[in-house]
Structure formats: C-alpha cells, structure tokens
Image (tube, rainbow, N blue to C red):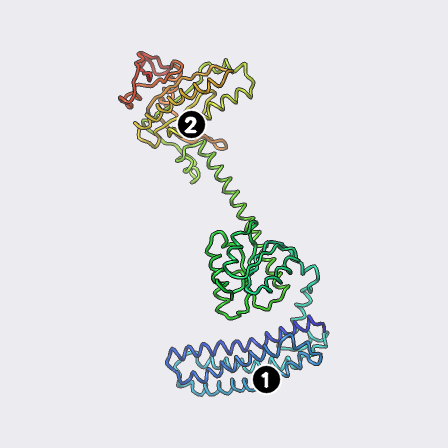
Amino acid sequence: MDTRTEKAFLGKARHNLKNPVNAILGYSEMLIEDCEDEGLDRLIPDINKLNQAGNEILASIEEIFNDKALSDPDKSISSIAEEMEVALRTPLNTIIGYSELLLEESDKVDIDNFVSDISKITESGKMLEKELSSITLFDSDDIKGIRKQNLNQGNLSMVKDVLDSINPLGEDDKKPKVLGNILAVDDNKNNTDLLYKRLSKKGHSVVTANNGKDAILRLTMARDGIDVILLDIVMPEMNGYEVLKFIKNDKRFFEIPVIMISSMDDTNSIYRCIEIGADDYITKPFEKSILDARISSCIEKKHLRDKEKKLMLELAEEQKKSENLLLNILPKEIAERLKAGESDIANKHDDITIIFCDLVNFTPQAQILSPNKLVQILNRIFKTFDDLSVKYHVEKIKTIGDSYFAVAGINDEKKQSAVNVIELAQAFLDSIKIINQNTPEMNLQIRIGVHTGPIVAGVIGKNKFAFDLWGSSVNMANRLETTCPPGRIHISEHTKEILQDDYSFELKEKTEIKGIGIVNTYIIE
C-alpha cells in the first residue's frame, strides 16, 4: 500500500474513533451543566470522571494514531490499533463503570434527559470498542479485498473510493494558480523571511512585517494594494487580533482577505478571529501546499471582488450619466416620476412664465456657412443659454430651429418665477453681444417674448419621449417674440402686472397678436 493510501486510511480510522469520543465529551458536558442548574452537585464528580476519561482517550488517539507512526517500518494500521486498544482499557472501563453507577442513581434524579444521555455515553463507549476491533482486524496489505471487508459498515473501505476519485498532487499543482500581493506578518523574522522566499519563488509579490504597527504601516504604504494578509496572533506592541480588528473596521482595508496563522489552536482564539472577519485560520506548523491553496483561493476571491467593485463603479457612473441626460431633457420632478414607473404624466399649472428667444435673420445668414460652422455657432449660443437657464432657475423645454423655449414657475412662486425669466432674458441679451463680437461670420441679434399664464405640461412619446407645454399661453409668448423689436424683451400685460414696479416698461399699444387679437403689450426698458 502506498504512503498516501496508508495516511488516508489512518486518518479515516482516527476520525471513526473520535466520533464516539466526541459524543462522550458532549453528553457529559451537557449533563454537568444540567446538574449545576438543578443543584445536583453530588453527581458532578462522577460525571466529571466520564469527561476526563473521554479527554484521556482523545489524547491517546492523537498520540498513537498519527502519521508519524507509519514511518516505523514495523508498524501497520492493525498494529497501531492494537497499541491503542491497550491504552483505552482503563479509560473505557471508567466510562462503562461510572455510567452504570449513575444509572443506578437515576430514579433520584429529576432531569428529563438524564437516563437517555447516560445511556448514549455507555453506547458510545461500546461503539468505540467495536470500532477499534474492526481496525485491529483491518488488513492494509490486501488492497483488492478492502471493499469486501466488513469494517464498520464500509466506513474504512469508502476511503479507497475517495482516493480513486481524487488525483494526487503533482508538481504543477504546487504552483499557485493565482498570483497577487501578499503581506506576511509574524514576530519571528525567520518565519517572515521563509514566507518571503517561498511565496516570492512561486511568483507572488511579498511584503513582510514583524509586529502589528509595522503591518499597518506597510498596508497603508502598499502602492499596488494588498490582495491577502497572512497574520500571526502573538506579537509585540500590537498583537494580530488587534490588527485584524483595525483592518475590519477600516473602510480602506476591510475587504482584504486575512488568513490567521498561529500556534494558538484553542477554540476561543479561532472563534473570535473568524467572528470579526478573518477568512481562514491555520495552526502552526502548517502544510505548505494547503497554505498555498488557501492563499490562491483568497487572492482569486479578492480579484473577483475588485472586478465587481470596478464594474459597480462603472455602472454607477453610467447611471449618473443617464440621469444627467434625463435631467437635461426633463425637469427633475418629471424625471423622478418617470424613474418611479409613471407612464402618463400630465399636469395643469397656473401663472407659468414662458420665454421664447429667437435669432434675428439667422436663416438667410446661415445659407452662406458650411454645416460644421453653422452647428458650431448654434452650439456656442445655446450652450451659453443653457448655463444661464440653470443659473436663473429657469427650465429649458427645447430648441426649435434657432429658437430657445424655456419656462419658470412649475414649482416656484409666480412673482419670483417672472423675475427669474426677465433676469434670464437680460442675460441672454448681454451674452449675445459678446458672442457676436467673436463671430465675424454673422451679425447676431435676438428678440425675446415673455408671457405668464396657465399651461398643460406633460411627457409624450415612447422611444423618444419629450416634456412639452401646451395652451394659449405658449402661443402668446411665441407671438410676443415674433412681434418684438430686435435686441428687446417683449412682455404681456399679465406679466407686467406680476412684475409690478420692479422694472421700467415702455407701452406698446394695440399690438396685433395672431390668433388673439389687438392687445396692449410692453417692452422692458
């Protein structure tokens, strides 16, 4: 039988022996707790003897059933089992004897599960004897007959099935599949030097530290980031447990996998480290190939998390661009309603102030320009108008050819909205003068119409939806623009009444507004 198979059989045998021992320890511990709760202190010494005997058997299993025993050419699994049988005689007699004594006391014990728990301890002791007997009869030299042997219902023979399924490690398997940046922390410089040489040889980039404070410093200084941390617990200045807590409470580092490597193998240490976020816990001395596999696994998970974070950031950036684009097309309130799932959005608003701004004689002048030049000039003008609209809290609706259409008052107080539109109109006039000075190809002038009144606003379309306004107030503002002198702001009488005495007005009597008739209008001076 090859060494790998022998070790596997020995491991399975060790496991099979530990199962009943674990039951003895577990039930005895629970019985001690029950007796303490019920005040049955007189029973505790005898139950303690059951527990002590179980621990004694467990220690013997670890000492006798270990891989080093097979290094002796005169030993086999059967001979090791015979040695174990001798070591178990006294503690097994203790378990069976004290279990019988305790059962005799059961009629005086007011604990529901007392008899059943003691019986399970007795059964576990007998099961241990039976398991040990089957191992003693085990013929490790007869590989072909292994599956035919009735060894504890085939538990040991199943090991061969597993070994046939799992290929042994080769040289290629000992090379890490995933490479990364490793921080190795241990107070023993020989240990960190050894880790550095071994892991560097395998292709990893390794940084070392010999105490907790140095580890945190190395972590913060790592330019390319750390993919996994190998962390000892017992260290001067700042121990590994404190370093682990620091890492898991720091938003910069809490996602970095941490593998604890320590000679401390007590349950409390392992539990607490896993509890606060350690990804793994390996006790010293460790198997190098197992450590390599765990390092590679942690690095791979870290790289996947980094990739996921990058994709999430890219997705958030694209979502932000999408939302900004939506806000460029729609008012914020309408955009939020669309994102919430509303489809038919329409509202009636009173006293909305509407502005139309049109470039005077733009079309005739545009005919002599190249398409690129024409678009450049329009883009310069309307980008400026967009920035000014944002500044004065006016909502752009759309551009229509060389005309700019915007509104205010959908969510604001009507007087302030009217003032904002007039301030915007004046800013349009100032900006177009500056743009005209830098545009020798054209003579740029604008005329502006402003009206305040009721409108209906809503979203239309499916694939290319748009927010738009309808009603006679929109037509009125448009007609005021078309009847406005170049370089002026033409407003309706209702808008003038809202503005009151904030501005100086020039009366434009009997202005004919198509579709409306003869009305008085005003020019802002």
SS at badge 2:
strand
Q: x%, y% of residue 66? A: 62, 76
**Residue at the spot 44% in from the left edge and 80% down from the top edge:** 114
Instruction: Examine the rendered structure and indicate whether residue 499 appears above or below residue 261.
Output: above
**Residue 154 in view (yes/no):** no
Count of marks overlaid on the render: 2
Which quadrant of the figure contains the N terminus? bottom right
Residue 197 is tagged as none
**Residue 463 in view (yes/no):** yes
Mark 2 lies on residue: 397
- Per the model, the C-alpha gap separating discs 1 and 2 is 92 Å
Residue found at the far top of this picture: 510
Q: Quadrant of residue 263?
A: bottom right
Q: Is residue 185 left or right of residue 433?
A: right
Instruction: Examine the rendered structure and indicate whether residue 434 appears above or below residue 162.
Output: above
- Disc with the residue nearer the chain's start (1 vs 2): 1
Q: x%, y% of residue 46? A: 45, 85
Instruction: Examine the rendered structure and indicate whether residue 245 appears above or below residue 130.
Output: above
**Residue at the spot 33% in from the left edge and 18% down from the top edge:** 524
**What's under tag 2, amino acid-wise?**
Ile
For the residue pair 379 and 41, the one nearer the viewer reads as: 379
Residue 87 is tagged as 1
**Label 2: few (<14), some (14–19) or many (≥20) C-alpha neighbours in 10 Å:** many
Circle nearer the viewer, 1 or 2:
1
**Label 1: few (<14), some (14–19) or many (≥20) C-alpha neighbours in 10 Å:** some
Q: Is residue 298 left or right of residue 358?
A: right
**What's under tag 1, amino acid-wise?**
Ala
**Residue at the spot 59% in from the left edge and 54% down from the top edge:** 181
Q: x%, y% of residue 279? A: 53, 60
**Residue at the spot 72% in from the left edge and 72% down from the top edge:** 2
Which quadrant of the figure contains the C terminus? top left
Q: x%, y% of residue 441? A: 51, 15
